[in-house]
Image (cartoon, rainbow, N blue to C red):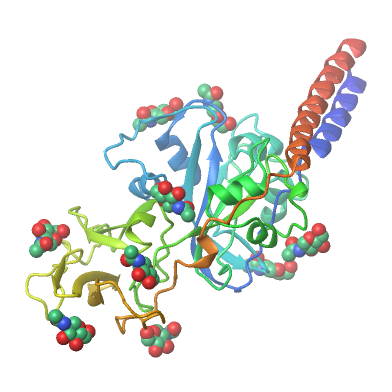
Amino acid sequence: MGYAKVLLGLLLVTALAATSTTQTKLKCSKEGAKCTALIEYVSPNNTNITTIQSLFQVKKFRNLLGANNFPTSIPSDKNVNAAEKIRIPFTCLCANGTGVSNRKPVYKVQEGDFMYHIAKEVFSGLVTYQQIAEFNGVMDPSLINPGQELWIPLPCSCDEVNGIKVVHYGMLVDAGSTVEGIAEQYGTTSGTLLTLNNMTDPSELLAGQVLDIPLPACSSHVSNNSLDYPFLLANGTYVYTASNCVKCKCDSANNYTLQCEPSGLKSTNSDWTTCPVMQCQGADGLFIGNKTSSGCNQTSCVYSGFTSQTILTSLVTESICPVPSSPPAPSAAPAPSAPYVPSAPYAPSAVPAPPAPSAAWRIGFQGLGWNFFLFISIQLIFLSLHLFQ
Ligand SMILES: *[C@@H]1O[C@H](CO)[C@@H](O)[C@H](O)[C@H]1NC(C)=O
Ligand SMILES: *[C@@H]1O[C@H](CO)[C@@H](O)[C@H](O)[C@H]1NC(C)=O
Ligand SMILES: *[C@@H]1O[C@H](CO)[C@@H](O)[C@H](O)[C@H]1NC(C)=O
Ligand SMILES: *[C@@H]1O[C@H](CO)[C@@H](O)[C@H](O)[C@H]1NC(C)=O
Ligand SMILES: *[C@@H]1O[C@H](CO)[C@@H](O)[C@H](O)[C@H]1NC(C)=O
Ligand SMILES: *[C@@H]1O[C@H](CO)[C@@H](O)[C@H](O)[C@H]1NC(C)=O
Ligand SMILES: *[C@@H]1O[C@H](CO)[C@@H](O)[C@H](O)[C@H]1NC(C)=O
Ligand SMILES: *[C@@H]1O[C@H](CO)[C@@H](O)[C@H](O)[C@H]1NC(C)=O
Ligand SMILES: *[C@@H]1O[C@H](CO)[C@@H](O)[C@H](O)[C@H]1NC(C)=O
């Protein structure tokens, strides 16, 4: 029996080595930079959104809803089906050339857990067990104890892409996807995706890989002394900021301009008993989110950040009449520079070339290879148990 155990151990080690892909490390060049990033999570079984919130230690339930553009009315016991995809918002930190989640989430090892299960199943393969071991200084991954705490280093980035500020989204590649198809879905180009992910050829795409997608972010007037600077909100998401007092959303339908309004919620700031009045100075009765227009000029009262004392606002005037002349007019508002110019990079790539069949084939094959290997390994384990009993 002792011999069987050794053999079983050997087989398991072989299986683990062969099935674990070397998960992506994403490039993050601005040393020490912090930003908000998103990652895709695929739950291994039926669960609820609160369980996912606590697994990833997302501080605010509302911001988890916002990252997925779920209605705010969704109850905390909302069911999440197995294989359903959920976007997780988290803080990214650039260190040593790569981006990883900033010391969170921390996972407490359960009875019967093993490293491979934690990486591949609990965290849906967003990290490898080798990465967890490396970042936690675990010398021997087979030696972890119930109750031990492990930091899960989720891959991310804070880099600008083509000179534009974006929100990096770590997407889990499905079997059968192509770089071309993913680029088209997210309004970017294959070339951008390949460069960003350090790939030379689309056929390098692997099922289960974390692919870095640059999501367009809305331009905002949030100033650099604000506690939520740089305020980068991805297209198709919303967030509560300024101690819950302000709700902002980003939508391509609004020309990638941040739309904020008073949230109507209670302040979570211990210094403010209630949310401050968010009125723009020099404009009668204009609050954050209000607009007035006279002639060609539209004046908006916009959110421009918060400090420990107050919520900042600013008045932005822009022309809403069509510009007749051909040379591009200089930006109307002498306001803080807009980080995102919705131009070329996100225009859907012109006439996508037919996807290279090799890419899809390769992925299909990879998927098969993986499952097949696992299947064979399990058969061998059972066989060996039989033999040595
Ligand atoms: C979510 O699921 C967990 C585990 O199944 C359960 O303990 C918890 O009560 C559920 N939470 C809600 C809000 O229903
Ligand atoms: C960067 O790498 C060095 C050497 O490998 C290490 O000592 C340091 O802790 C790393 N920094 C961070 C923030 O991980
Ligand atoms: C669901 O998956 C999680 C993560 O792998 C696990 O901890 C939990 O026990 C599973 N729940 C059920 C009901 O299988
Ligand atoms: C990019 O890939 C090459 C080879 O595939 C590797 O040598 C290099 O270290 C990678 N660069 C980064 C930044 O990951
Ligand atoms: C903050 O922005 C102001 C003007 O918008 C600029 O003068 C200043 O240098 C910026 N400060 C930092 C730390 O970037
Ligand atoms: C932006 O978000 C909208 C709504 O969620 C979506 O329809 C659109 O495809 C997105 N555009 C890009 C470029 O991601
Ligand atoms: C969208 O924004 C760009 C740059 O901020 C501007 O040039 C363009 O006129 C805007 N389009 C509309 C329809 O408002
Ligand atoms: C200004 O915004 C507030 C709150 O968003 C709203 O209740 C009010 O009707 C708006 N006022 C005008 C003049 O649009
Ligand atoms: C519109 O704004 C410009 C300057 O931004 C100003 O010169 C002009 O008088 C304004 N027009 C109206 C109708 O308010």
Quadrant hosting residue 54: top left
Q: Is residue 133 left or right of residue 89?
A: right
Quadrant placement of the N terminus:
top right
Residue situated in front as seen by the camera: 382 or 109: 382
Residue at the spot 12% in from the left edge and 81% down from the top edge: 282
Residue at the spot 31% in from the left edge and 84% down from the top edge: 334
Q: Is residue 113 left or right of residue 363?
A: left
The x, y position of residue 348, in whole percent, is: 53, 55
Residue farthest to the left, as pictured: 284
The x, y position of residue 62, in whole percent, is: 33, 47
The x, y position of residue 87, in whole percent, is: 48, 45
The x, y position of residue 44, in whole percent, is: 57, 30
Q: Compared with residue 250, is residue 73 higher up or lower down, i.e. above or below?
A: above
Quarter holding ligand 7: bottom left
Q: Compared with residue 170, is residue 198 higher up or lower down, i.e. above or below?
A: below
Q: Is residue 219 left or right of residue 23?
A: left
Residue situated in front as seen by the camera: 286 or 380: 286
